[in-house]
Image: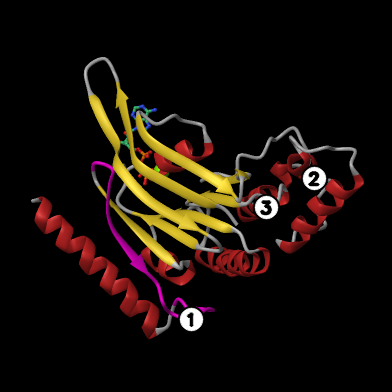
């Protein structure tokens, strides 16, 4: 379980003739076994936030710490598309950047494949799997390095409703069992309400505008009145912000 501390984190993308502020002095803290969703309209900086947390991008200014006790936290990243390497088998995708020859590592990877019901696919290639199966393999890969912090960027947005629902359940199970800290980007407010302990609402221009704690007990049923009410509350908050902006 990791701790993330962001203080006035700012990211500007400067091109020849324009400057885009992707993150506008964003500050927040996440620690322990939290499941925090980041929601907001397209272009509000969600992926940029995960890219900076993972080190793919660097911030323009501000402070960022990701720790696990005294040491730097280990990260896992589930991308929006599974991004499996097509020339490697499913098992070799999990073993990528791990010690291939180590028996324990192989067993751990197999265990995570089984957790997402892909235990039988280790020797297959990504092209032999459906889109949903590839996405599950991507999730198993991220968990298999046993990270302290899991970053997930809209991992279910391209899946059909039924596969999405079963993967949300699996993810909730895995999160409960493995006690990870999760930062989860989504467009889907219902999904955020169903899975999160806290929701960070972002608005255009890279502003973190509100943090909402989700007190509903788990497991949550996406079709329940409680989830519908919480969703309506968040939508109202976004609408109020839009009124302010116009
Ligand atoms: N490499 C880049 N160069 C220039 N501008 C960029 C770059 N990456 C992102 N941006 C800009 O930064 C802003 C935030 O982009 P980002 O991808 O973080 O948004 P997002 O919230 O993830 O959107 P979506 O929901 O559509 O995935 C956008 O205006 C985008 O055009
Ligand atoms: Mg994005």
Find disc 1 in the rendering and name its residue.
217
Residue reaching furthest bottom?
Answer: 225
Queried whether the magenta region covers residue 6, the answer comes back as no
- Which one is in front, 147 or 139? 147
Mark before the other along the chain sequence, 2 or 3: 2
Residue at 65% x, 52% y is: 130
Find disc 2 in the rendering and name its residue.
91
Instruction: Give how far across and how far down residue 203 sits, in percent.
Output: 25, 50
Judge left or right: residue 242 versus residue 102: left
Residue reaching furthest front?
Answer: 70
Instruction: Give how far across and how far down residue 46 sits, in percent.
Output: 38, 45
Vertical side of 135 occupied by 15: above or below: above
Disc marking residue 109: none
Quadrant position of residue 166: bottom right
Residue at 37% x, 69% y is: 213
Prevailing SS of the magenta stretch: loop
Quadrant position of residue 204: top left
Find disc 3 in the rendering and name its residue.
143
What residue span does the magenta drawing correspond to? 205-222
Vertical side of 59 occupied by 243: above or below: below
Q: CA distance from mark 3 to mark 1?
A: 25 Å
Instruction: Give how far across and how far down residue 17 sits, in percent.
Output: 22, 17
Position of the N terminus, as image quadrant, is bottom right
Residue reaching furthest left?
Answer: 246
Queried whether the magenta region covers residue 209, the answer comes back as yes
Residue at 39% x, 61% y is: 188
Ligand 1 shown in quarter: top left
Q: CA distance from mark 2 to mark 1?
A: 36 Å
Q: CA distance from mark 2 to mark 3?
A: 13 Å
Label 3 SS: helix
């Amino acid at each position: 379980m990791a701790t993330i501390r962001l203080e006035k984190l700012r990211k500007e993308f400067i091109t020849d003739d324009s400057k885009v502020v992707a993150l506008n002095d964003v500050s927040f803290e996440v620690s322990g076994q939290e499941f925090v969703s980041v929601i907001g309209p397209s272009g509000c900086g969600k992926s940029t936030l995960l890219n900076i947390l993972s080190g793919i991008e660097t911030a323009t200014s501000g402070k960022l710490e990701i720790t696990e006790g005294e040491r730097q936290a280990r990260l896992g990243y589930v991308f929006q598309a599974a991004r499996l390497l097509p020339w490697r088998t499913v098992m070799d995708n999990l073993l990528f950047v791990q010690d291939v020859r180590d028996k324990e590592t192989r067993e751990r990877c197999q265990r995570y494949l089984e957790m997402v019901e892909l235990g039988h696919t280790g020797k297959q290639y990504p092209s032999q799997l459906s889109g949903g199966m590839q996405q599950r393999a991507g999730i198993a890969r991220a968990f298999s390095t046993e990270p302290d912090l899991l970053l997930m960027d809209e991992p279910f947005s391209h899946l059909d409703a039924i596969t999405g629902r079963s993967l949300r359940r699996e993810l909730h199970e895995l999160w409960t069992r493995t006690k990870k800290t999760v930062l989860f980007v989504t467009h889907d407010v219902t999904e955020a309400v169903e899975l999160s302990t806290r929701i960070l609402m972002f608005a255009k221009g890279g502003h973190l505008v509100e943090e909402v704690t989700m007190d509903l007990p788990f497991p949550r049923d996406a079709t329940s009145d409680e989830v519908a009410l919480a969703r309506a509350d968040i939508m109202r908050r976004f609408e109020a912000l839009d009124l302010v902006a116009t």
